[in-house]
Image: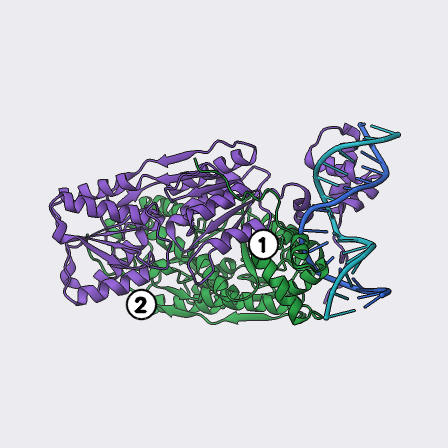
Chain colours: A purple, B green, C cyan, D blue
Amino acid sequence: MTIDKTVPSRRTTIEDVARHAQVSRAAVSKVLRDAYGVSDDMRERVNRSIEALQYRPLISARGMRGRTFTLGVAINDPANGFITEVLTGAASAVEGTQFQMILSVLDDQFGSSYRAVESLYDRQVDGILAVSPLAEPEWLEGMARKVPLVQLGVHDRSAHHDTIVGNDVEGIRLMMRHLMDLGHTRIAHVTHTDPSWIANPNRPHIMREHEYRRIMAQAGLTDEIDVIPAMFEDHATYLEMRRRFAHGLRPTAVLGGNDDAALGVMRAAAEFPDLDRLSISGYDDAHFGGHPRVGLTTINQDGRQMGRRAVQMLLERIEGRTESRYVEVPVRLVTRTSTFAPG
Amino acid sequence: MTIDKTVPSRRTTIEDVARHAQVSRAAVSKVLRDAYGVSDDMRERVNRSIEALQYRPLISARGMRGRTFTLGVAINDPANGFITEVLTGAASAVEGTQFQMILSVLDDQFGSSYRAVESLYDRQVDGILAVSPLAEPEWLEGMARKVPLVQLGVHDRSAHHDTIVGNDVEGIRLMMRHLMDLGHTRIAHVTHTDPSWIANPNRPHIMREHEYRRIMAQAGLTDEIDVIPAMFEDHATYLEMRRRFAHGLRPTAVLGGNDDAALGVMRAAAEFPDLDRLSISGYDDAHFGGHPRVGLTTINQDGRQMGRRAVQMLLERIEGRTESRYVEVPVRLVTRTSTFAPG
DNA sequence: GTGAAAGCGCTAACAG
DNA sequence: CTGTTAGCGCTTTCAC
């Protein structure tokens, strides 16, 4: 066992730096914040001391007076491919700024984002990015009055927060046209219908389902409408689809409410060889669907770009913008086929 | 535009609650912390006021004196399948406790975990879970002296932090035996060799590579040893493998240093039809490899379980345990084949 | 069983 | 240009 040298039991504080540099605490604080009114000589002395003492400001203490330089991102499911894309984009936008990003994951049994978002608020973040929050619009607006907030995914406008969404109606339109052009009429739609979820017509999956129903009806296929309830998660979808396939259900195409759902359909379909010609498509264009063996046809809404833009908007709000913005990003159809390679 | 009712410009504080309940601030604080010395009557009065005022304690202020009830998890890449598994497990272990989990993502160009971990420390978390941290062991040990810490992935022991790892040596052994039993001799290994990474022989990928080399040599296949450098990320692996395949490199089996690398190999292989019989295997058993169309043979080390155990160990440390623990979880070979289903 | 008061590390007036 | 000082909201002795 080696000897413990330099065990700093007490954290280095601004006071220590001030003493070391022979200046006042206020002076150190000013250097830290790049505030007005410090001589070059002083700045250098202070910086040297900061370096020497390995000083790092305590965010909690900072937060009690001013900013924490922290952006909070609330997400529902870290395993979801689209969310991963958003996070990657968000992280790239934060990089190089003085802000640090922290994530809070939805963690309660009620399937709501309240705790995840509140927990960020309690931690004094300077701004919140709520990714497809499971919360009442009014509640979110209330939060937005207290802290700069950008909401991603849900088509709710507010004068108090910004919103960035994909064009879900257009996305479903593109996909349905594609499937119908291929000659499909028995098109089923897998979506999330958990009743514990917030009933909000502006949530993307509700908009997608709505548009699916509308297009089917308009094409005279009302009788073929088949909305399959499953979680937005491939295992639950797999179980539900397997049950249905086993009961003889035979759509010619299944449109997943998101890519994970589509993957679950594939899992189930793999167990029914007579389903060889089933068309399976998804929504979101998460990374995984692009794998050559999967070759998922889907709708791209550029999650990375959305995450990046969202953070930019949030930073603008933190810097003082008050008029609210509503951004709808374009979507495009991505058609793929699976390339099989054994091994 | 609706009228803004109830815009609480100032946050509700413990002072407000005390006034509302007609007690002292200290009394409220005690109720909050379930501390000793409060009458039932008082507790109820206070709780009613907390409810009525929708009071939520400010974590920053709490942190300045006591705990923040926050667990910080530092990760390198949110898109990595194994990390996702670990997070899922960690989240399940945090659920139901009074702690809240926040994540910090590696975000610097230098490919080091210093900022991610320090940022958690600066935010006064009560404990840190460092997932495969890219940091000098001594540095991490220094952090561990200041805050309860559990390290997951790297085979470094310390008297100051706990460690939980998979049995990487055994994992590679299982996989190599499997491949050799299938008759393979031209087995290549894809791994991460970025020189900017911390050179630590205890990092899992280094241990895996080492064991791969050892087994090849022992089998008299020294000349066949082929370590392919690529990032642990499927795109980079794809590019490197495509280049190699195009140059005529034809191993009969490729062992990916992790699943993502294996997926990248598959992507590249899909472009070379004459590679039909190439055996591709991975390591980690991330969710995606189990998809029937992918059917990746890999080594399972139960990331969820690891994440769950890691959080449990961290909570124990926070509660006062000081003797350090080193846990190695078992691994097992998972063989799969891809089931093709067009669509 | 209860409350007054000190202080955590920092920022922001405000004096000098 | 620099230093003094008053808090931010909470927890924690320590009297009562």
Please provide percent x and percent y for residue B230. Answer: 44, 49
Query: Which amino acid type is shown beneath numbered disc 2?
Result: Leu
Q: Looking at this view, is B314 or B275 the one in front? A: B314
Q: Where is mark 1, residue-wise? A: B53
Residues at marks 2 and 1, CA–CA distance in whole angstroms: 69 Å
Please provide percent x and percent y for residue B42. Answer: 66, 67
Query: Which amino acid type is shown beneath numbered disc 1?
Result: Leu
Q: Looking at this view, is B342 or B221 the one in front? A: B342
Compared with A2, A336 (above or below) is: above
Q: Quadrant of the C terminus of chain A?
A: bottom left
The answer to whether residue A186 is seen in the rendering is no
Please give the chain letter of the residue carrying mark 2: B
Q: Where is mark 2, residue-wise? A: B182
Q: Please name which of the two marks, 2 or 1, marks the residue nearer to the observer.
A: 1
Q: Secondary structure at mark 1?
A: helix
Q: Quadrant of residue B148?
A: bottom right
Please give the chain letter of the residue carrying mark 1: B
Q: Looking at this view, is A336 or A322 the one in front? A: A322
Q: Looking at this view, is D1 or A95 the one in front? A: D1
Q: Quadrant of the N terminus of chain A?
A: bottom right
Q: Secondary structure at mark 2?
A: loop
> Which mark sits nearer the N-terminus, 2 or 1?
1
Question: Are there few (<14), some (14-19), or many (20+) residues within 10 Å of tag 1?
Answer: some
Please provide percent x and percent y for residue B5. Answer: 51, 42
Evaluate whether label 2 is on the same chain as label 1: yes
